Image (tube, rainbow, N blue to C red):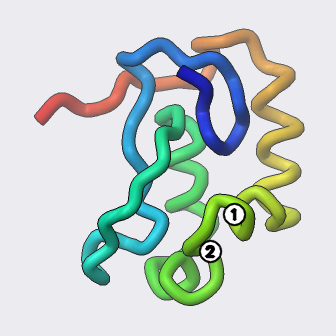
Amino acid sequence: MDCSICRRDTPDRYVEKHHLMPRCKKGKETIPVCVDCGNQIHHLFSIKELQQKYNTLEALREDPKIQVWIKWIRTKSFGICMKEKKRR
């Protein structure tokens, strides 16, 4: 499956669902992202920013900070910086 952010082909064990509208704000719609991109999104943006400004895939992908991230992560060999998602 391709990550919606970096578009790397990602094995299922590294895929997680990212809520476009934060779950704590009653968000339901999700997109598949690799664990690295999911972590980076939450590192760069607060819940409030995700709710108000980055609640669509297009808004996330167009942000300059995410563009830098995408450019960087796509140069890495797959699995170099990925952690497996937490099992619940």
Q: Quadrant of residue 64?
A: bottom right
Classify mark 2: helix, strand or loop: loop
Across and down, in percent, residue 32 comes to 48, 39
Classify mark 1: helix, strand or loop: helix
Which residue is located at x 76 percent, y 31 percent?
Answer: 73
Question: Which labelled disc corresponds to residue 60?
Answer: 1
Across and down, in percent, residue 3 comes to 60, 33
Across and down, in percent, residue 23 comes to 29, 70
Say above or below: 60 vs 39: below
Which residue is located at x 71 percent, y 31 percent?
Answer: 7
> Is 76 left or right of 38, judged from the image as shown?
right
Q: Nearer the viewer, residue 38 or 27?
A: 27
Q: Quadrant of residue 88?
A: top left
Name the kind of residue labelled 1 in the image.
Leu
Q: Whole-Å distance between the Cαs marked 2 and 1?
A: 5 Å
Is the residue marked by circle 1 packed among few (<14), some (14-19), or many (20+) residues within 10 Å? some
Question: Which labelled disc corresponds to residue 54?
Answer: 2
Across and down, in percent, residue 68 comes to 87, 50
Which residue is located at x 69 percent, y 63 percent?
Answer: 60
Which residue is located at x 33 percent, y 30 percent?
Answer: 85
Q: Nearer the viewer, residue 45 or 63?
A: 63
- Residues at badges 2 and 1 in contact (C-beta under 8 Å)? yes
* Residue closest to the far left: 88
Say above or below: 47 vs 64: below
